Image (spheres, rainbow, N blue to C red):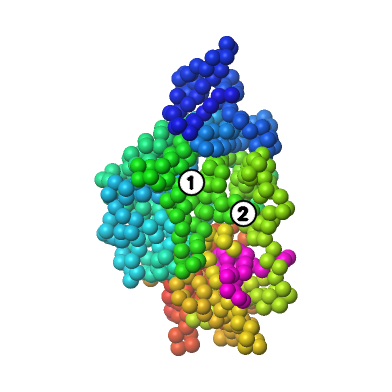
């Protein structure tokens, strides 16, 4: 069986070997060239690696639907101890040109670029060009100052409190479809941000904008383009010979894989029963503009798990602990999430349209996938990865006990914790909608079988018991908006308090049904036009019926720019997409602001944009 890219780290050509007819091992530098120009059917078996038959059987079964004629598919690599133990492609990388998956096909990395940007920033720090604890204005002098200091470190681990620009543009009426936008346009929006969503370091929201600013910082400290900086700081040292930062995300190059939605419906996101819209395409960016082959993924994995000159591994630095509050460990680190799967620690990150990189440090194991057959209703991106983890564990004696029912964490998945065995009293107390009166933030608790879940802003997740008596917190794998909940049963009537973001201390929640302020207001009182003094966008609020409002962003001519508002309590409303078949990934809380008992404005609070204010436009009464 040929060896490919072993732990000694040979280059692409040197690492490929093939057995000759007389059994000798010959270097074949022509193989890479032939992969580019020869008929792919004749070369399909020459690069396949299989050193674990049981694992291979599991991966083959997972990808069997992609082997039908004309189907797009995937390519999967598994490395252990730095050596490739499995490498195989399934189906077509490009149906238009009948190109089968092979190790040299290019695919856009999208968000798996994030850890690469973080690795390049850390390398720049090692070279004395910057410090992760530098304030960002040191390198972005035109960026606005906020009362709280924001560091490069907080850009990388998504704790800066800066608004997520890809969410902001949807609030500004650009959510109808996939559309292009320049970095300068996004940066101009960012520089107008009036306030932070939260104090830096106290909460988290997945934030592409921070990685864009990190890319700008790399350009400033190196004096070179982001593409050149990444090549010199990461791609060349790692041997990622075909990796590059694309000038523009949607650009195609020769032998590049596009993604195909092969679901029998429009439901690209089955958990929402909808197809997501409102995706933006940007220029060269630190959040997702990398591209390359599975070989580049392999070289990257080998490089960051190799000790550097300072004696440290980049993968360990990317996974260093991040604490939002004392003792409260975050899942999201520096371009990687650190998650617990049945007791196995997994460093991982996904990329839009079917890319996953995952490292299991206990086994020195990498799983690298590129899938362009998007059939998420069959197997989601995360499920695809963790079925391969299961396949490895079934094949490995040290890992097999994690797959046994004797493992106390056997039933834990990435999305769901083990059974907390909540009591009837707990189900009764943590149930229903509540409001924190000072912020107007609503939170809903609800029972889901044997689980207690909460919905806060756009995040829905499980609660698990905390370290203190009568305390609860977000399930550890939630990678944004972590919360802590406290129940005081000493008062006779249980009190619930919530600690969130930069509140500093737990604040008492009020049941929504008791939050009477404005609860009897007629919907007509809220109807009218509202304008953002910062961004100029105008919203129209219309009465939909006696219980609901319709919010129209901008002209509101497209269904994608319309939300239905449902009253939670008083002047506080939750939102939902008006048309079920599509999912615009914004579902903010809308709070109406009053002055002299009249509605004077609204405040929009989403996950990535909190505190967007619009003032009511006074309309002249018709004669």
Residue 44, placed above or below residue 392 = above
Q: Where 520 sits versus 179, above or below?
A: below
Residue at image point 49% right, 81% down? 438
Observer able to see residue 453: yes
Q: Main secondary structure of the magenta part?
A: strand
Residue 520 location, x and y as percent?
61, 85
Which element is circle 1 on? helix
Tell me if residue 357 is in the magenta stretch. no
Distance of mark 2 from mark 1, alpha carbons?
Answer: 24 Å
Q: Is residue 266 visible?
A: no
Residue highlighted by disc 1:
112
Q: Position of residue 295 (x, y in %)?
A: 49, 33
Label 2 vs label 1, nearer the camera = 2
> Crowding near pointer 2: few (<14 within 10 Å), some, many (20+)?
some
**Residue located 45% across and 24% down the image:** 14
130 and 9: which one is in front?
9
Exactly how many numbered labels are in the figure?
Answer: 2
Q: Quadrant location of the N terminus?
A: top right
Q: Is residue 456 magenta?
A: yes
| 418 relative to 593 in the view: left or right | right
Q: Give the camera-side residue of 605 and 118.
A: 118
Vertical comparison of 371 with 450: above or below: above
* Residue 519 image-quadrant placement: bottom right
Helix, strand or loop under label 2: loop
From which residue to which does the magenta span run? Answer: 449-474
Q: Picture coordinates of residue 281 (x, y %)?
A: 45, 48
Residue 343: numbered disc:
2
């Amino acid at each position: 069986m040929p060896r490919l890219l072993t732990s000694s780290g040979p280059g692409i050509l040197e690492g490929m070997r093939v057995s000759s007819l007389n059994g000798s091992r010959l270097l074949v530098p022509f193989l890479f060239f032939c992969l580019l120009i020869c008929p792919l059917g004749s070369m399909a078996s020459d690069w396949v690696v299989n050193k674990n038959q049981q694992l291979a059987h599991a991966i083959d079964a997972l990808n069997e639907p992609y082997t039908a004629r004309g189907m797009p598919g995937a390519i999967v690599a598994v490395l252990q101890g730095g050596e490739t133990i499995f490498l195989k492609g399934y189906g077509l990388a490009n149906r238009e040109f009948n190109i089968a998956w092979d190790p040299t096909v290019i695919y856009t990395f999208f968000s798996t670029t994030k850890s690469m940007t973080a690795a390049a920033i850390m390398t720049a720090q090692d070279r004395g060009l910057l410090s992760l604890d530098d304030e960002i204005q040191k390198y972005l002098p035109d960026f606005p100052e906020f009362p709280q200091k924001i560091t490069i470190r907080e850009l990388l681990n998504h704790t800066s409190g800066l608004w997520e620009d890809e969410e902001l543009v949807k609030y500004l009426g650009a959510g109808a479809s996939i559309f292009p936008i320049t970095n300068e346009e996004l940066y101009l929006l960012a520089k107008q941000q009036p306030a932070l969503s939260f104090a830096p370091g106290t909460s988290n929201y997945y934030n592409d904008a921070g990685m864009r600013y990190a890319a700008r910082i790399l350009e400033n400290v190196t004096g070179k383009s982001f593409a050149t900086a990444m090549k010199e700081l990461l791609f060349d040292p790692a041997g990622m010979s075909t990796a590059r930062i694309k000038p523009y995300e949607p650009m195609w190059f020769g032998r590049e894989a596009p993604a195909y939605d092969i679901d029998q419906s429009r439901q690209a996101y089955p958990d929402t029963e909808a197809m997501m819209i409102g995706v933006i395409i940007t220029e060269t960016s630190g959040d997702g503009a990398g591209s390359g082959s599975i070989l580049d993924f392999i070289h990257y994995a080998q490089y960051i798990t190799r000790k550097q000159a300072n004696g440290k591994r980049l993968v360990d630095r990317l996974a260093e602990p991040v604490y939002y509050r004392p003792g409260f460990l975050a899942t999201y680190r520096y371009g990687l999430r650190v998650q617990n799967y049945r007791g196995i620690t997994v460093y991982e990150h996904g990329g839009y349209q079917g890319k996953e990189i995952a490292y299991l440090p206990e086994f020195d194991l990498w799983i690298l996938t590129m899938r362009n057959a998007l059939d998420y209703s069959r197997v989601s991106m995360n499920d695809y990865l963790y079925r391969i983890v299961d396949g490895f564990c079934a094949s490995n004696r040290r890992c097999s006990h994690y797959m046994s029912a004797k493992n106390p964490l056997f039933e834990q998945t990435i999305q769901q914790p083990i059974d907390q065995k909540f009591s009837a009293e707990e189900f009764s107390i943590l149930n229903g909608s509540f409001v924190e009166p000072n912020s107007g933030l609503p939170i809903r608790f609800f029972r889901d079988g044997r689980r207690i879940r909460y919905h806060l802003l756009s995040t829905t997740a499980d609660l698990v018991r905390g370290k203190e008596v009568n305390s609860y917190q977000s399930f550890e794998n939630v990678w944004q908006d972590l919360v802590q909940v406290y129940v005081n049963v000493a008062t006779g009537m249980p009190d619930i308090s919530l600690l969130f973001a930069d509140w500093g201390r737990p604040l008492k929640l009020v049941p929504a049904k008791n939050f009477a302020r404005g609860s009897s207001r007629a919907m007509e009182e809220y109807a009218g036009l509202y304008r953002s003094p910062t961004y100029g966008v105008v919203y129209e609020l219309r009465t939909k019926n006696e219980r609901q409002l319709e919010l129209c962003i901008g002209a509101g001519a497209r269904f994608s720019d319309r939300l239905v508002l449902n009253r939670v309590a008083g002047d506080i409303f939750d939102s939902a997409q008006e048309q079920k078949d599509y999912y615009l990934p914004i579902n903010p809380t809308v709070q109406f602001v009053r002055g002299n008992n009249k509605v004077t404005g609204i405040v929009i609070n989403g996950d990535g944009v909190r505190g967007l204010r619009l003032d009511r436009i006074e309309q002249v009464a018709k004669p």
